[in-house]
Image: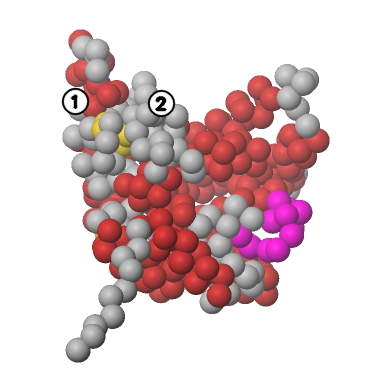
Amino acid sequence: MRTETWPVLTFQEEMSWLKKEIKRRGYYRKQPARMVAERLSFLLIQLIGIGGYWLAEPLIMKVLAILLLAVGVLGGAAHTHTASHQGLFRTRWLNNLVVFLGYPFQVGLSATHWWHKHVVVHHPNPNIQGIDEDIDFMPYFALTEADLKNVSGIRRLWYEWQWLIFPLSLSLTFSNMQLAGWKHLVSVLVNRPHRKLIHWLDLASLIGHYACFIVIPALFLPITDVVFFYACWLLLTGFGAYALLAPGHFPSEAQVFTEQALTGNFYLRQLATTVNFRAGWLGNWFCCGLNYQIEHHLFPGVSHQFYPAISELLQPICQRHGYPHQTLGWGEALWKSYRIIICPKPVFEAIT
């Protein structure tokens, strides 16, 4: 009896098939109506939070309003993240418009800085020591064993006890992102050969943010109350930003590599440095694909609503060829993201 043998495909061949399958199933298509509805839902939550804070009298209601505002801000920022990869709409100008409205105008984060730091630098080099700024908290905190090299005395003692201070510092996550954006934007604007119209648009959007959130409200309300309100939601959003961004690359399962490592293997560089985390149906809506970091890094231009389906296709391919595809619970991922502050991660020159 004759038995047919099927050819054994390489990982690269299976990934080529996956790309074609994704296209065949229509996962590259955009769903503008759904994207607009999601966007409006986050904006509505944000506006309810703002209105609730200023209209409510009981302290508990003001606290709930601030929490609601933070949810709207973070959800909108996660949604804007997809737009920054041209994943919401078919046209580039419409995606860019969402980025300008979502980052500089809505949350005070420079759009041009985000594009440079996240899209240009981070995505080709996730968890690459010396390149990816997302894993570089020096000189304040050491995340890798390489950060501790040649460190002694008071600084060494600080890093040994940094795990006590780090949780408090998370409230500054978003404000630090804002500050880094300002530094980047100003450095470009004063450099005449490098500045472009997009940088001036970025500056105008940032000015519009502070005008809407501080200057205009201060015309009708005490300036101290306005600044206190702005500081409250900014600090609270800092914790939320860490909860959204850290689990994808901070846990020990997401390895850190030297610049020379894995340069010839794009897929392995993305898979070995990235993990997914489970968030449930409500978390999927709120995270806008940030909980599917693996699929996002491999297919950044795909709209986030297709990542769960793509993940189901990708996992068996990785398993067949021994490539990592790791998923953690959200709480587990957060704990392991904090665990590296207690015990910094090693830096590898090859996959382990």
95 in magenta: yes
The amino acid marked with disc number 1 is Glu
Is residue 122 visible in this depiction of the protein?
yes
Q: Which of marks 1 and 2 is in front?
A: 2
Is residue 239 visible in this depiction of the protein?
no
Q: Residue 160 bears which disc, if any? A: 1
Residue drawn at (61%, 28%) of the image: 184
Nearer-the-camera pick, 233 or 329: 329
Q: Which residue lies furthest to the bottom in this view?
A: 1
Between disc 1 and disc 2, whose residue precedes?
A: 2
Crowd class of label 2 (few under 14; some 14 to 19; many from 20; radius 10 Å): few
Q: Is residue 194 above or below residue 345?
A: above
349 in magenta: no
Quadrant in which the C terminus is drawn: top left
Q: Position of residue 195 (x, y in %)?
A: 75, 27
Question: Which residue range is magenta in the image?
Answer: 87-97
Q: Is residue 56 above or below residue 205?
A: below
Nearer-the-camera pick, 125 or 242: 125
Q: Where is residue 31 in the image (x, y as percent from the top left)?
A: 64, 72
Residue receiving disc 2: 130
Nearer-the-camera pick, 312 or 44: 312
Q: Residue 289 bears which disc, if any? A: none
Residue drawn at (68%, 71%) of the image: 32
Residue drawn at (56%, 70%) of the image: 23
